[in-house]
Image: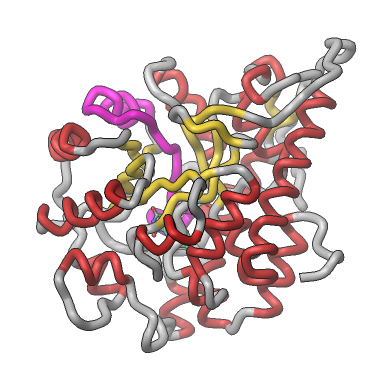
Amino acid sequence: MSDEQINVADFERAAAAKLEPGVLGYFAGGAGDESTLRDNVAAWGRWQLRPRMLTGTAEWSARTEVLGAQLSMPVLVAPVAFQRLVDPEGEAAMARAAATAGTAMCLSTLATALPGEVAAAAPGGHHWFQLYCFSDEGVTTALMESAVDSGFEAIVVTVDAPRAGNRERDFRTGFALPEGLGVPSVQAALGADREVTVQEAFSLVDPGLSWPDLEGLASRCEVPVLVKGVLTGEDASLAVEHGAAGVVVSNHGGRQLDRVAPTADSLEEVVDAVAGRAPVLVDGGIRRGVDVAIALALGADAVLVGRPALWGLAVGGERGAQRVLEILRAELELTLLLCGCASPGALTRAHVQRAPAATVYSG
Ligand SMILES: Cc1cc2nc3c(=O)[nH]c(=O)nc-3n(C[C@H](O)[C@H](O)[C@H](O)COP(=O)(O)O)c2cc1C
């Protein structure tokens, strides 16, 4: 890491130069033609801000509360698998970065560290656990309980990945986890005494999961359960009706079903359908503080970033991930001030408008 990296795009370029092709393809890639992957980023640029002047905003802050947690900003770290592929400290370093930056980190089921290890690495941090539901309910329950017992504050059930998407970059590079890098949570929950491959872990995920199953899980869980991977108002309503304490508008960073709408374009219908009954979070393609501001203006309570934090970790370890998060916070704070808003909650639908069709903003 050097002083040359002053924005997320700088970190992305530096990570691309550093990582070997198979690993880079795994983290950067998406499904199919990668249309949704690209559009996730582009879609935020199809909105413009409508700043207000002379609002008397002499003090401003990005601080916010999400599910009872006081955070320095409405930007959380999304669950991203196998972080030790880019840094020897992996998820532990990411958790420390998030805690130092004052925000929450969501640990993947496919993490290369156990929830207990992450909690110990960043005591006092806010930790959420992303859960894949396995066909064997006992495995799912063991995963959930291990996170809750380690002090994790929320469970985020990912519903858009009954199987892994068609990630052609990985086929081309022949990407496989190096020996010695496993998914200890899944191994422990399965009671396996050997490493579990990515394909194997996905093959055990329950493709037949239904809303009543989700409701059962939420009722058994001692902490709030969010549903991640919702793209329609219909599913957002069903999630809330079946016990979800929050909804994450997400297309898995364009890695699952290609040609779905970018999340920037799905957000409003979800916000309208949820109608204030639960917090709405969104991820996918957030690369700038202005993207965060647009998401908040469209009704999100917070956003998550996947690849940006990962690029930080790859380039500069814990300090790199922390720096990326701090860049996003500084950009958001400046955007708030320049929009005349004292807090994230002050951004409203009146602060954004559609950009003319020919407008393309890109980093
Ligand atoms: C390499 C990689 C691995 C991911 N692993 C998981 C995962 O294990 N569980 C999950 O729910 N989402 C996973 N995601 C999706 C992220 O949580 C998030 O939805 C996505 O990265 C957001 O898009 P962004 O990378 O453009 O910020 C992964 C994303 C990437 C890039």
- Magenta-span inclusion, residue 237: yes
- Magenta-span inclusion, residue 182: no
Start and end of the magenta stretch?
233-257
At horizontal 44% and vertical 29% (from top left) the residue drawn is 67
Q: Is residue 173 visible?
A: yes
User: Where does the image place residue 338, in percent across and percent down from the top left?
Assistant: 84, 26
**Image quadrant where residue 304 sits:** top right
Q: Is residue 349 left or right of residue 49?
A: left
Q: Is residue 317 above or below residue 40?
A: below
User: Where does the image place residue 64, in percent across and percent down from the top left?
Assistant: 60, 28
User: Where does the image place residue 241, in percent across and percent down from the top left?
Assistant: 24, 23
Which color scheme did the rendering employ for the protein? secondary structure
At horizontal 14% and vertical 50% (from top left) the residue drawn is 208
Q: Is residue 223 above or below residue 60?
A: below
Residue nearer the viewer, 279 or 89:
89
Q: Is residue 181 above or below residue 134?
A: below
